[in-house]
């Protein structure tokens, strides 16, 4: 039996909620996740029409990119489409879940999918997150150091950029005096003991804290292992806003702008004044990504593709970079395919389908 929480756990394994932005409200919007899952409908936004689509399909899970509930409620009376969706979902035992900036910021998320669609190479996160790493320092007897390191690495610690199993190790002497009711690994109760130990330092993303500490405690030979946790300000290159990469070959500006329209099926594309230069390095941020203009310029990008920008943004880029704005909905519609791939790979026989509803609130005449 596949429960709804099993499906959502798999989504969060790829896009942990801890990497969402502070303003966001990704995660469970409404419903009981412990019930058996009958199917998942994937969408960009939740509307009444999409809830009806899930009901007609017999599905009790809707996974959207944009959260249905962004602001706190004082009452739910059906006075707007958000509340009507909530009420209808409750009446039909439907769970609504959103993976928003967490799937934006994740490796393999929205921006990675867009980069893949344009064939970018040497891709990397444009603006890595900060304050999301923890350094673990612990001390272990020499003969147990390798076992402990392996357990920590298996739990997800020790990843730095394109490297894994990263740690620092130093020899030293630890002392302890086992008192009554203790069960020392070495030494005798009531006697001061000195043990040759290895100091192990490694790092891990904050969302793995519980699993890393659990792994440490499960294999450490001491009854009372000593360990320290330090929150780091370092940039974490495994999560963040936007992406940057290179095209296989230089391309003419107008030709590439037309390719953007073709690849993303965009009817209307806005762009800043042409720079007169060919393009090679491309920065991308789905949704509202104009805040990354300066970082894209600093990273050497020739063009920034995003979903939304303000009027003055087209002035502010001057001749430093080409700005291409394709529409918020158009820049993130690929999110449904990301959800589909994650779920179907883990649960190949589970009923999952993309919504056929076009929920874009912006219409073009």
Image (tube, helix red, strand yellow):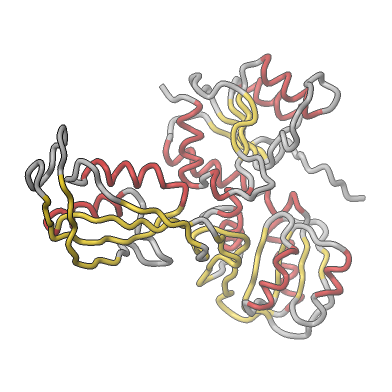
Q: In this rendering, is residue 364 above or below 197?
A: above
Against 155, residue 167 (above or below) is below
Eyeballing the image, is 247 above or below 12? below
Q: How many marks?
A: 0
Q: Which sits in the foreground, 263 or 218?
A: 218
Residue at the limit of the structure toward the left, as seen here: 188
Q: Relative to 236, does residue 57 appear above or below in the rendering?
A: above
Image quarter hosting the N terminus: top left
Residue 224 percent across, percent down from the top left: 24, 43
Residue 80 falls in which quadrant of the image?
top right
In this view, the residue in front, 299 or 234, is 234
* Residue name at image x 18 percent, y 50 percent: 176
Residue pushed farthest top?
91
From this viewpoint, which residue is outermost toward the right?
Answer: 365
Q: Position of residue 207 (x, y in %)?
A: 47, 47
Residue 141's spot in the image, x, y percent? Answer: 15, 55
| Left or right of residue 309, residue 12 in this image | left
Nearest the eye: 339 or 189: 189
Answer with the quarter of the image where residue 143 lies.
bottom left
User: What residue is shown at x 83% (from left), y 73% (from top)?
Assistant: 272
Instruction: Return the residue found at the far bottom.
Output: 276
Residue at (55%, 50%) from the top-left corner? 19
Position of residue 247 measured from the top left corner of the image (x, y, whole percent): 59, 74
Instruction: Residue at 86% x, 74% y: name it.
Output: 315
Q: Is residue 92 left or right of residue 322?
A: left
As drawn, is 256 to the left or to the right of 113? right
């Amino acid at each position: 039996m596949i429960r709804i929480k099993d499906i959502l756990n798999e989504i969060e394994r790829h896009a942990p909620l801890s990497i969402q932005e502070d303003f966001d409200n990704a995660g469970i919007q409404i419903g009981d996740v412990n019930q058996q899952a009958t199917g998942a409908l994937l969408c960009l936004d939740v509307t009444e029409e999409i809830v009806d689509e899930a009901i007609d399909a017999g599905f009790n899970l809707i996974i959207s990119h944009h959260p249905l509930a962004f602001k706190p409620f004082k009452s739910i009376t059906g006075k707007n489409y958000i509340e009507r969706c909530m009420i209808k979902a409750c009446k039909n035992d439907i769970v609504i879940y959103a993976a928003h900036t967490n799937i934006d910021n994740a490796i393999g998320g929205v921006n990675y999918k867009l980069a893949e669609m344009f064939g970018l190479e040497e891709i990397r996160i444009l603006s890595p997150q900060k304050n999301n790493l923890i350094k673990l320092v612990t001390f272990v007897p020499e003969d147990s150091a390798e076992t402990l390191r392996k357990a920590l690495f298996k739990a997800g610690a020790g990843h730095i950029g394109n490297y894994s199993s990263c740690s620092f190790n130093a020899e030293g002497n630890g002392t302890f005096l086992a008192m009554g009711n203790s069960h020392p690994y070495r030494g005798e109760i009531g006697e001061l003991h000195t043990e040759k130990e290895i100091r192990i330092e490694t790092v891990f993303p904050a969302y793995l804290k519980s699993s890393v500490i659990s792994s440490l405690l499960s294999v450490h030979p001491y009854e009372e292992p000593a360990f320290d946790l330090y929150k780091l300000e370092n940039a974490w290159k495994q999560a963040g806003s936007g992406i940057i990469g290179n095209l296989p070959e230089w391309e003419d500006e107008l030709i590439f702008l037309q390719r953007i329209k073709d690849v993303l099926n965009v009817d209307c594309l806005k762009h800043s004044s042409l720079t007169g230069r060919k393009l090679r390095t491309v920065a991308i941020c789905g949704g509202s990504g104009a805040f990354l203009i300066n970082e894209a310029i600093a990273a050497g990008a020739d063009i920034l593709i995003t979903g939304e920008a303000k009027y003055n943004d087209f002035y502010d880029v001057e001749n430093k970079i080409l700005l291409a704005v394709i529409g918020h909905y158009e820049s993130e519609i690929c999110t449904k395919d990301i959800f589909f791939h994650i779920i179907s790979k883990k649960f190949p026989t589970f009923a999952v389908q993309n919504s056929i509803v076009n929920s874009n609130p912006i219409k073009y005449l």
